[in-house]
Image: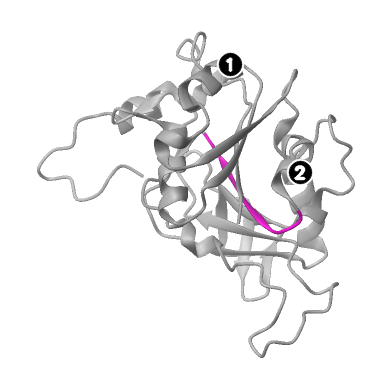
């Protein structure tokens, strides 16, 4: 399995921290956000990694290089103008191949997520070894988290049949998902498109799967959240901030 780290965002809400540093290189506990993901992917046996970038992308390439320092093989998909999440993936499909891959938002912090969970998520066979009918297969599998304070209404309802646009209980997309390449077939490389639009469409078709994971997770969307993560742990702290 290959992975793509989505690192092309401008990080406007993180200004002035991102004025001269791309958001994925901001540090949490002494380590760039994107490096946490690289190390965890490699630990799970996922070493072929694609990184898309736009804003200050040369800094990302200079910092990470070919990935050998992390035990990874990193290739890059540069964008002159950021193509949004789905557009960035579509533009990098030639590097990702024809098998399901894991995509990760490079600006989230989830140091304990086990990426080995992703390896067999979108199997083409059911539990008895029979091929799934093509119109019944999940096109994507999203890892969801408990709704954070800044997003109390969540993104999708989670039930036994998958993820739905309507209903309860609701959870928030973590920024980690496994996708089939055909999910992006309608997006012309080099054009801008958002993942959420695809998600909504496939949820209505009953082809969006997902599950809630329970681990420390933060959408590092503001300087305040970054500062909270970097607050020294005390002896009474039981877990990392989430």
Q: Residue at x 48, y 27 (%)?
A: 64
The residue segment tinted magenta is 98-106
Q: Residue at x 73, y 43 (%)?
A: 195
- Say which residue label 1 marks: 58
- Say which residue label 2 marks: 93
- Residue 222 in view (yes/no): no
The quadrant in which residue 122 appears is bottom right
Give the left or right position of residue 153, taking residue 196 as reference.
left
Q: Is residue 86 magenta?
A: no
Give the left or right position of residue 66, taking residue 218 as reference.
right
Q: Residues within 10 Å of mark 2 (few under 14, many from 20)?
A: some
Vertical relation: 124 (above or below) 63? below
| Of residues 135 and 90, the one drawn nearer to the viewer in this rendering | 90
Q: Residues within 10 Å of mark 1 (few under 14, many from 20)?
A: few
At numbered mark 2, what does the secondary structure look like: helix, strand or loop? helix
Task: Give how far across and how far down residue 92 sits, in percent.
Answer: 74, 38
Vertical relation: 138 (above or below) 61? below
Vertical relation: 133 (above or below) 6? below
Q: Residue at x 72, y 59 (%)?
A: 99
């Amino acid at each position: 399995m290959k992975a793509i780290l989505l690192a092309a965002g401008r990080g406007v809400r993180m200004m002035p921290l991102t004025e001269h540093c791309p958001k994925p290189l901001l540090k949490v506990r002494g380590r760039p956000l994107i490096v946490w993901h690289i190390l965890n992917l490699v630990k799970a046996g996922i070493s072929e990694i694609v990184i898309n970038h736009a804003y200050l992308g040369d800094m990302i390439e200079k910092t990470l290089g070919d990935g050998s320092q992390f035990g990874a093989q990193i290739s890059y998909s540069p964008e002159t103008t950021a193509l949004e999440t789905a557009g960035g993936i579509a533009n990098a499909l030639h590097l990702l191949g024809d098998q399901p891959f894991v995509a990760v938002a490079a600006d989230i912090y989830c140091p304990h997520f086990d990426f080995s969970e992703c390896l067999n998520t979108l199997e083409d066979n059911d539990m008895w070894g029979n091929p799934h009918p093509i119109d019944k297969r999940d096109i994507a599998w999203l890892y969801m988290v408990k709704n954070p304070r800044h997003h109390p209404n969540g993104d999708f309802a989670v039930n036994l049949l998958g993820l739905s646009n309507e209903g309860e209980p609701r959870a928030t997309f973590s920024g980690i998902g496994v996708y089939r390449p055909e999910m992006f077939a309608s997006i012309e490389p080099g054009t801008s498109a958002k993942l959420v639009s695809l998600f909504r469409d496939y949820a209505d078709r009953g082809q969006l799967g997902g599950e809630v994971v329970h681990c420390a997770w933060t959408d590092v969307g503001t300087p305040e959240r970054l500062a909270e993560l970097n607050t020294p742990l005390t002896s009474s702290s039981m877990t990392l901030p989430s």
